[in-house]
Image (cartoon, rainbow, N blue to C red):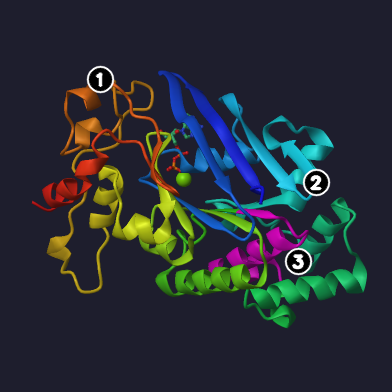
């Protein structure tokens, strides 16, 4: 089966006062129908830029310098990066919906929830009147909101968690095949976060959209994703199914991230975060961008950047030292 989205050799830069920020560097990956791909990595690794790039919502200082984002539905194939005008607006709702990091303020404050659904439907020639309301109520129930309570409300009358769920329901209104969620629970308290995660799991079981789930929180990624891509300094450095990512990671950075996750049993003192910080994306170090922080780095790592290479079916790693991954794990712990 053809993937719903196939990102190929995508590079994105920001023009900043100090120079060019290489936020996404030659990234390729695929997401299939019904599949959830998590993008994980520390803050500043390029995850949001990647999401914004796919739907062409980057700020004007950003530039896509190369690559494609091929989107497929049935017999239709298009490059989302080349769409303009009406075609782009249609793509954003009907094919690919997104809920971004700062989404809590994304609802129009002067419109009741009913009108937010009404306007969106109208703009795209979708259902109106009773049929629209029924569809919206069904979606609101799917995200565990009481349509009675929410339908006539203004956004400010709802809690952050409720607004986030309205946005997810609204995003699904036009039945998109691809949903991008950028840190959808970050601004919320733990209980609300739990609730949104349960909603997302239920939605995935009921609908078969492809999902790109962006998170710096590995435990959330573990819960929702089928596959996980680890992003470091604008590049995917490891990609594998979720079980492999957590039980048999081979990139020292993925290993470091996983070691930094508190386990239920583990005492806080066992937590080892990765020493150092991510590189300056304007002046990237030579060789592997992780080498200054890597316990396994040798001369080759300092000079030559490894590309993402398959080491097993469905598991690719960009690391010269992937065979020594176990050793990396020990070194991080000591
Ligand atoms: N508008 C911008 N102008 C310049 N640099 C930016 C801009 N937005 C993000 N960046 C830089 O791009 C890199 C990637 O950022 P981002 O995609 O937000 O990462 P993440 O979502 O993983 O935290 C960071 O180094 C960030 O500072
Ligand atoms: Mg981000």
Q: Which residues are magenta?
A: 153-179
Q: Real-space Cα distance between discs 1 and 3? A: 57 Å
Left or right side of 13 for 42: left
Task: Verify whether residue 17 appears in magenta.
Answer: no
Task: Verify whether residue 155 appears in magenta.
Answer: yes
In the image, what residue occupies the spot 18% across and 59% down?
271
Q: Earlier in the sequence, mark 1 or mark 3?
A: 3
Left or right side of 73 for 67: left
Q: Real-space Cα distance between discs 2 and 3? A: 38 Å
Quadrant where ligand 1 appears: top left
Looking at this view, is 151 or 308 the one in front?
Answer: 308
Looking at this view, is 247 or 293 the one in front?
Answer: 247
The residue indicated by pointer 2 is: 75
Q: Is residue 163 above or below residue 318?
A: below
What percent of the width, then of the height, locates residue 225?
48, 60
Looking at the rendering, which quadrant does residue 223 occupy? bottom left
> 10 Å neighbourhood of mark 1: few (<14), some, or many (≥20)?
some
> 10 Å neighbourhood of mark 2: few (<14), some, or many (≥20)?
few
Q: Is residue 187 above or below residue 78?
A: below
Q: Earlier in the sequence, mark 2 or mark 1?
A: 2
| Disc 3, SS | loop
In the image, what residue occupies the spot 75% across and 33% down?
83
Q: Real-space Cα distance between discs 2 and 1? A: 45 Å
Q: Can residue 226 be seen here?
A: yes
The residue indicated by pointer 1 is: 303
The mark found on residue 112 in the picture is 3
In the image, what residue occupies the spot 72% across and 30% down?
82
In the image, what residue occupies the spot 35% across and 36% down?
318
């Amino acid at each position: 089966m053809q993937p719903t989205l196939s990102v190929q050799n995508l590079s994105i830069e920001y023009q900043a006062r100090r120079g060019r920020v290489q936020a996404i560097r030659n990234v390729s990956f695929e997401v299939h129908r019904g599949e959830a791909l998590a993008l994980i990595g520390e803050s500043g690794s390029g995850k949001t830029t990647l999401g914004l790039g796919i739907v062409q919502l980057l700020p004007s200082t950003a530039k896509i310098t190369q690559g494609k984002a091929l989107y497929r539905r049935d017999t239709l194939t298009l490059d989302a990066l080349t769409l303009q005008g009406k075609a782009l607006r249609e793509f954003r709702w009907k094919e690919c919906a997104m809920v971004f990091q700062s989404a809590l303020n994304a609802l129009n404050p002067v419109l009741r929830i009913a009108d937010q659904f009404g306007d969106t439907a109208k703009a795209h020639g979708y259902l109106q009147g009773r049929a629209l309301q029924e569809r919206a109520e069904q979606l609101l129930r799917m995200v565990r909101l009481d349509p009675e309570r929410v339908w006539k409300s203004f956004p400010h009358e709802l809690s952050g968690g409720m607004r986030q769920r309205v946005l997810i329901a609204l995003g699904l209104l036009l039945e998109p095949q691809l949903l991008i969620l950028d840190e959808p629970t970050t601004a919320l308290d733990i209980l609300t976060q739990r609730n949104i995660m349960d909603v997302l799991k239920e939605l995935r079981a009921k609908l078969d959209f492809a999902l790109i789930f962006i998170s710096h929180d590995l435990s959330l990624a573990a819960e929702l994703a089928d596959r996980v891509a680890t992003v470091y300094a604008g590049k995917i450095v490891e990609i594998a199914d979720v079980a492999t990512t957590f039980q048999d990671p081979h990139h020292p950075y993925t290993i470091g991230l996983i070691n930094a996750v508190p386990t239920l049993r583990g005492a806080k003192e066992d937590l080892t975060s990765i020493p150092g910080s991510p590189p300056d994306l304007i002046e990237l170090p030579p060789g592997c961008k992780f080498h200054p922080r890597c316990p396994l780095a040798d001369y080759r790592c300092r000079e030559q950047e490894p590309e993402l290479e398959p080491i097993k079916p469905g598991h690719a790693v960009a690391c010269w030292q992937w065979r020594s991954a176990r050793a990396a794990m020990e070194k991080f712990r000591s």
